[in-house]
Structures are given as C-alpha cells and as structure tokens.
Amino acid sequence: MTKADIVAEIATQTGLEKTEVLRAVEAFMTSIKSSLTSGKNVYLRGFGSFVVKERAQKTGRNISKNTTIIIPAHNVPTFKASKTFVEQVKNELTIG
C-alpha cells in the first residue's frame, strides 16, 4: 500500500477531500519525523511505537576491494508494532 492508496482509503472512509487527507497524512509523517530527529519517541497506543535505536560500531567487509572497514555507531528509526496489532495480524492471516 502506498501513501496515495492510504489517502484514497481515508478519503473514502471519511468523505473528506483527498487534498485535505493528503495534508493531514503529510503533517502526521512530518510530526513523527521531527519528534524522532529531536530524540523523542512516538507511542501510538494499540498501533505501535516509533523509536530511535543506536547501532553500535561494527566491522564490515568491502568484498570488491577485499578490505575491512569500520562502520561507525549511528542512530536508526525503527517501528515496533503493539502486541494487540501483532495478534490481530496473526489471527487475520491464519484465518483468511
């Protein structure tokens, strides 16, 4: 499902114009991005959590040059689905 599909689905369900829905979806995504970039996690009860995780420094290999490189520690955004969401998906996929 793409962003355009999400906008179309919400517009159909709510009766709102697609342009209004698109602005709301864009604002939602911008809000999550700005929270994560400022170090704040986002918790959506019943859906999941957007959190920033720190990846430790590690050693990697450049196989084309046959050399070892150091990959520095860095932060990455992650999403963890809530338990109820995971159970719902699990039940729907096994039944359907």
Image (cartoon, rainbow, N blue to C red):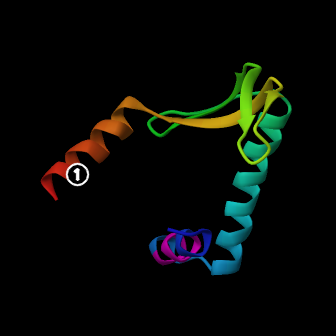
| Quarter containing the C terminus | bottom left
Against 9, residue 84 (above or below) is: above
Q: Is residue 65 magenta?
A: no
Residue 83 figure quarter: top left
Q: How many other residues sit within 10 Å of disc 1, few (<14), some (14-19) or many (≥20)?
A: few
- Return the residue nearer the eye: 89 or 84: 89
The residue under the point 75% across, 38% down is 66
Q: Is residue 8 magenta?
A: yes
Q: Secondary structure at mark 1?
A: helix
Against 64, residue 86 (above or below) is: above
The residue under the point 35% across, 38% down is 86
Report which residue position mark 1 lands on: 92
Query: In the displayed image of the protein, which residue is found farthest to the left?
Result: 95
Against 71, residue 89 (above or below) is: below
Q: What secondary structure do most residues of the magenta stretch adopt?
A: helix
The residue under the point 13% across, 53% down is 95
Query: In the displayed image of the protein, which residue is found farthest to the front?
Result: 66
Q: Is residue 13 left or right of residue 79?
A: left
What segment is highlighted magenta in the picture?
Answer: 7-12
